[in-house]
Amino acid sequence: MHELWSERDPRVPPHRRISADGRPTVAELAESIRSHPPASVGLLAIEVLGSRDVVGYCGLVDGRAFPGEPELAFELLRRAWGQGFATEASLAVLDRARSCGHQRVWATVWDWNTASRRVLAKLGFHETGRYEVHPDRGTTLFTSRRL
Ligand SMILES: CC(C)(COP(=O)(O)OP(=O)(O)OC[C@H]1O[C@@H](n2cnc3c(N)ncnc32)[C@H](O)[C@@H]1OP(=O)(O)O)[C@@H](O)C(=O)NCCC(=O)NCCS
């Protein structure tokens, strides 16, 4: 997680990036994960078959889009981009969401995040027309998919 946070795009809000003095530290991130156990599926580590290299996460979080409906989240280390991992992992998570009884999943994405928007389109997410504008960081699009 620390490696992921340190690679984040400068347009990601500062409180979700590693500061110049290295905060949050690995220990602080570990403590934050331990003290916030996931409600249902949670965020799962993406491990590459064979090498067992952990290259990111994918899962469901309690979304802000619609009460009781989860939000898909994924993020990979840069060295693992462009190999279909986000799409493959998301398909597994969506299967799990369906088997847990969820009927709809949301995903929010910055309008400038072309790769993520492409992943969501490949997964069958549709833009809902709902969005939030931040003056500096861009527009957050709300997308959803029925299961
Ligand atoms: C978004 C992200 C998860 C994608 O992971 P990935 O494993 O590389 O995704 P996939 O390989 O499954 O698919 C990426 C798709 O986007 C396309 N793509 C990537 N960069 C692109 C760009 N700059 N312009 C257009 N298309 C792009 C790829 O060609 C591919 O589409 P294709 O299969 O039709 O060729 C990864 O880039 C990432 O971790 N980004 C930072 C965190 C993030 O944005 N998380 C999502 C928040 S909503």
Image (tube, rainbow, N blue to C red):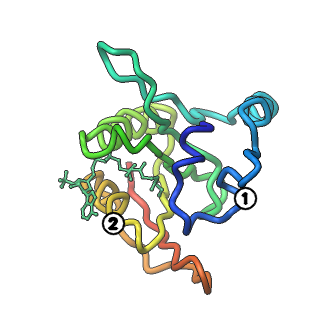
Residue 42: x %, y % from top left: 60, 35
Q: Which mark is residue 3?
A: none
Circle 2: element type:
helix
Q: Which residue is mark 1?
A: 15
Residue 131 in the image: state x and y as whole percent. Answer: 52, 79
Q: Amino acid at mark 1?
A: His
Q: Nearer the viewer, mark 1 or mark 2?
A: 1
Rendered view: 66 above or below 48? below
What residue is at 59 percent from the left and 47 percent from the top? Answer: 5
> Which numbered disc, 1 or 2, marks the residue that appears first in the sequence?
1
Q: Is mark 2 within 8 Å of ligand 1?
A: yes
- Name the side, left or right, on which 107 lies relative to 2: left
**Which residue is located at x 51 percent, y 79 percent?**
139
Q: What's the CA distance linking mark 1 and mark 2?
A: 22 Å
Nearer the observer, 50 or 78: 78
Which of the image's four quarters has the N terminus? top right
Residue holding disc 2: 114
Q: Above or below — where is 119 with respect to 32?
A: below
Q: Nearer the viewer, residue 146 or 120?
A: 120
Question: What is the total number of numbered labels drawn onto the structure image?
Answer: 2
Is the residue 36 above or below the residue 147 in the image? above
Residue placed at 77% from the left, 28% from the top? 34
Q: State the residue in front, 119 or 79.
A: 79
Give the camera-side residue of 96 and 5.
5
Identity of the residue drawn at 33% across and 15% down? 51
- Residue 109 appears at what percent x and percent y? 47, 65
